[in-house]
Amino acid sequence: MDGQDQDLVDVDLYDPGDSSLPVYRWRQAGRANLATRRQLREMGLRPGGAEPVARIECRGGKRFAWLYRIDLAKPKFAMTLAKEAALDKAMAARQTCPGPCGRRYFHCLPLRTLGSCLECFDGTPADPTSYIAPPAKHLLAA
């Protein structure tokens, strides 16, 4: 092992160092007043700048999530047309085959590994219900 690697230390930005944040085991935290970010999102809420008040651990402490107070959470921001258009544009980049077929699939394509859809890559036929046909090219525009 390199001498530099021994100097690396994991730093928890939210832990004050005196172990004042309570740590709960999996399914032991009170669901009535504490929630993770994902649980807040399901309730239509967001932390809203509030600091975590506890931590929940699972898999022997190898995985953890921050817990936030539900009463301090704020409503999620409403989706605007501009946000929706930006998200659709981003997803289109991940779902559209850059190969000759040009189809937009209903799932993300393996563009980093294959560079195209399976049909363009190795000829594996795609299920017709898994994509939207590409826009037709106008015959007069040549």
Image (spheres, rainbow, N blue to C red):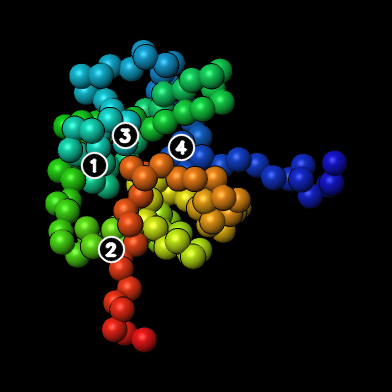
Give the number of the disc on residue 86. Answer: 2
Q: Is mark 3 on a helix, strand or loop?
A: helix
Q: Which comes sooner in the sequence, label 2 or label 3?
A: 3
Calculate the distance from the C-alpha at mark 2 to the C-alpha at mark 4. 38 Å
Calculate the distance from the C-alpha at mark 1 to the C-alpha at mark 2. 21 Å
Q: As drawn, is 141 to the left or to the right of 97?
A: left
Amino acid marked by disc 3: Arg
Q: Which residue is drawn at 79% across and 49% down?
A: 4
- Outermost residue toward the front? 139
Q: Is mark 1 on a helix, strand or loop?
A: strand
The residue carrying mark 3 is 38
Amino acid marked by disc 2: Ala
Q: Which of marks 1 and 3 is in front?
A: 3
Residue 78 at what x, y percent from top left? 14, 51
Calculate the distance from the C-alpha at mark 2 to the C-alpha at mark 3. 22 Å
Residue 25 at what x, y percent from top left? 44, 16
Q: Which of marks 4 and 3 is in front?
A: 3
The residue carrying mark 1 is 46
Q: Which comes sooner in the sequence, label 4 or label 1?
A: 4
| Mark 4: few/some/many CA within 10 Å (<14, 14-19, 20+) | few
- Viewer-closest of 81 and 61: 81
Q: Residue at x 31, y 85 (%)?
A: 141
Q: Is mark 4 on a helix, strand or loop?
A: loop
